Structure formats: C-alpha cells, structure tokens
Amino acid sequence: MTHDTEKVIIVEGLTDKKQIKKVIAEDADIICTNGTLGVEKFDELLEEYDLDNRDVYILVDEDSPGIKLRHQLSRELPHAEHIYVSSEYREVATTPENILAAELVGKRIAVNPIFLI
C-alpha cells in the first residue's frame, strides 16, 4: 500500500485524533491504538502503514496506560520521535490547542497558524 504522506502520528484514542486533526495543517496518517497493542495488531499496523519506512511520531497521554504504550511503541519503533503533553494536562484530548500546536511545530509538523498565537 502506498501512502500520500510521509508522516504518521500514533495516538491512543479517537478524541486524541480529533484534537490533533483540529490543529495540524498537513496531511498525516493518525493511527488510534485504542490502548495497548497486542503483537498481532501491531504487526497489522506495521504492515498496513509501512511504519518502518515513514516518519513516525508517538503522542500519547501522560498517564499510566499512555506511558506503558509509549514504552511498548519505543521498543517496536526505535526510529519514532516522541511528542509529549504536559503532565499538567495529562491527556492529549484535553491539552489546549495552542500548547499542542507548539509541540507539533517543534517536531516539524505544520499546524494552523491561528493556534500559534
């Protein structure tokens, strides 16, 4: 399968995906893991999204399940870059758009300029 974009952002849930889609201004595949990944499910994602050959970003919540998922993905995708939300907000979905935009821009992901004010 070919992909129109080089970038993939891995998040935990649909609300995280919606929050990121509001902020970014470029095409990127946003993958929801819906929690921790089993080997079979991870292998499916690896193949379907060609994760070994794309720019992968991990953006998960700063809570126990999110940290566990980040560690798991770090082992499986050592080339992935990490994007962190402040523990003050704990969740990607509840992080203010301007804060999220600043973190994404720091990783060379284009965002809608209205969120950089």
Image: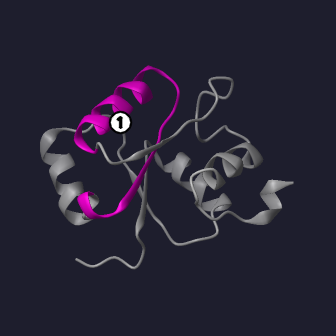
* Residue that lies at the very extreme toward the left in this rendered image: 40
Q: Secondary structure at mark 1?
A: loop
Towards the viewer: 94 or 59: 59
Q: Which residues are magenta?
A: 52-77
x and y percent of residue 96 in the render?
74, 42
Quarter of the figure with residue 90: top right
x and y percent of residue 31 in the render?
39, 55
Towards the viewer: 75 or 41: 75
Q: Was residue 33 drawn as part of the magenta stretch in this picture?
A: no
* Residue that lies at the very extreme toward the top in this rendered image: 64
Q: How is the image coloured?
A: one colour
Relative to 97, 57 lies left or right: left
Q: In the rendered view, would you say 1 is above or below 44?
A: below
Label 1 sits on what residue type? Answer: Gly
Q: In the rendered view, would you say 30 is above or below 93?
A: below
Residue drawn at the location 40% of the way across and 79% of the way down: 4
- For label 1, the residue is 35
Residue drawn at the location 14% of the way across and 41% of the way down: 39
> In which quadrant will I find the C terminus?
bottom right
> In which quadrant will I find the N terminus?
bottom left
Q: How many C-alpha atoms fall within 10 Å of the one at disc 1: few (<14), some, or many (≥20)?
A: some
Q: Was residue 61 drawn as part of the magenta stretch in this picture?
A: yes
Relative to 112, 32 lies left or right: left
x and y percent of residue 71 in the render?
33, 29
Residue drawn at the location 12% of the way across and 46% of the way down: 40
Q: In the rendered view, would you say 11 is above or below 51?
A: above
Relative to 95, 72 lies left or right: left
Residue drawn at the location 35% of the way across and 25% of the way down: 68
Quarter of the figure with residue 72: top left
* Residue that lies at the very extreme toward the right in this rendered image: 117
